[in-house]
Amino acid sequence: MAKATAPKTRRGIERRAKILAAAETVMGEQGFPAASIADITREAGTALGTFYIYFSNKEEIFRELVLEMGKVTRKMVAEAIADAPDRLAAERAGLAAFLNFVAKRPALYRIVEEARFVDPEAYQRYFTSFGDAYAAQLRAAEAKGEISPGDADIRAWALMGMAKALGDRYVIWDDVPDIDRVVNEAHRLICRGLVPDAAG
Amino acid sequence: MAKATAPKTRRGIERRAKILAAAETVMGEQGFPAASIADITREAGTALGTFYIYFSNKEEIFRELVLEMGKVTRKMVAEAIADAPDRLAAERAGLAAFLNFVAKRPALYRIVEEARFVDPEAYQRYFTSFGDAYAAQLRAAEAKGEISPGDADIRAWALMGMAKALGDRYVIWDDVPDIDRVVNEAHRLICRGLVPDAAG
């Protein structure tokens, strides 16, 4: 099947973005299997046929949302850690940025998790790409002596998992998330682990 | 709708267990939406009608599998950490037991993750119950001075998330998982965090 064309006019770009935002809302609320293209265009306030100008099917717009989550989270974390003086400070800033993102776009977060079942390849690509970039940063920090030596890939995955679980429990499930508290506590664990203080 | 009855005879118990094991295989492979009751009874080698002696519908057997994962993982982790001399040793043994469980029952692991979408209440109950038990153990360890002081709930969720992400990446995705290596590296992070050694 021919891939739907990318819009060239400003009106087209806006209309595509509107449909994408509507898909985020509808799929985030209903989940992929229940969400219909009619629900999406209704939410977007466009005609059903307009969907097919920009997307071939439901699977394609879903994958597009997973890609968007990748772009947005990576940009947001990069901005958040740009001014961090060292890697430990960057860990704190990155975790805070991620949890704030989950609070702001819970539907997009849910869609990426649903990709594990709906589009396993996109799911794996998403986390592999994020994990590779994370590990590269840890390697650079180790070379500068900012963190202790260790396997950067395993650490990157452990830290991503930590952030995801905290996002589930303290952002998605809590009515009033206290992100600062979670970040402070998790950051202490990330920096110093569980061993009692030498002085203790 | 009346709940299907629990079996009383040995034959009934075995037949129910067979259907449950078949559901684990079929739902683990196909996912909940695609898996049919006919697929499950075919896999179990029983008549379609036999399913309804023990379960009312697909949703009920799915929930039963989530409950089973809860029972099995908890028992397995409890056994694994029973002989650990302190909490840090227990963290290592518990993580190793969890990752080995994921390697052994990948379908059950996948089913619990799918519960996030198929049966959010069961999903939340599963992780809340596991997290509460985990936090209680961390609190007891802190009281004994085995670990540094800190918020036990946030730490429990962070550590569960770590284990899940490592299970995804290094057990589910890898053809030949090297669980020892992952456990060693993650355990160092759990104990000492990322800060460079004082001597470094």
Image (cartoon, coloured by chain):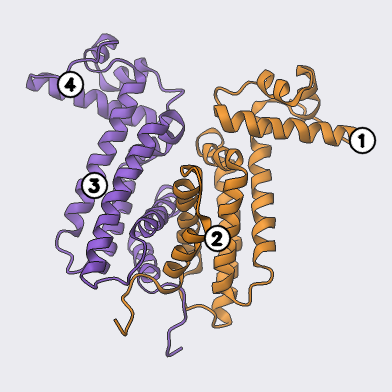
Chain colours: A purple, B orange
Label pair 1/2, CB-CB below 8 angstroms: no
Q: Which one is earlier in the sequence, the residue at label 4 or at label 3?
A: 4
For label 4, the crowd category at 10 Å Cα-Cα, with few meaning under 14, some 14 to 19 and many 20 or more, is many
Q: Indicate whether A126 appears above or below A186.
A: above
Query: Which label sits on residue B9?
Result: 1
Residue A93 appears in the figure: no
Mark 2 residue element: helix
- Per the image, the residue denoted by label 3 is A74
Label pair 1/4, CB-CB below 8 angstroms: no
* Circle nearer the viewer, 1 or 2: 2
Q: Amino acid at mark 2?
A: Leu
* Circle nearer the viewer, 1 or 4: 1
Q: Chain of mark 2?
A: B
State left or right for residue B146 relative to residue A163.
Answer: right
State left or right for residue B55 relative to residue B126.
Answer: right
Mark 3 residue element: helix
Instruction: Give how far across and how far down residue B169 sits, in percent.
Output: 44, 47
Location of residue B2 (image quadrant): top right
Residue at position x 62%, y 46% from top?
B104
Q: Chain of mark 4?
A: A
Query: Which label sits on residue B95?
Result: 2
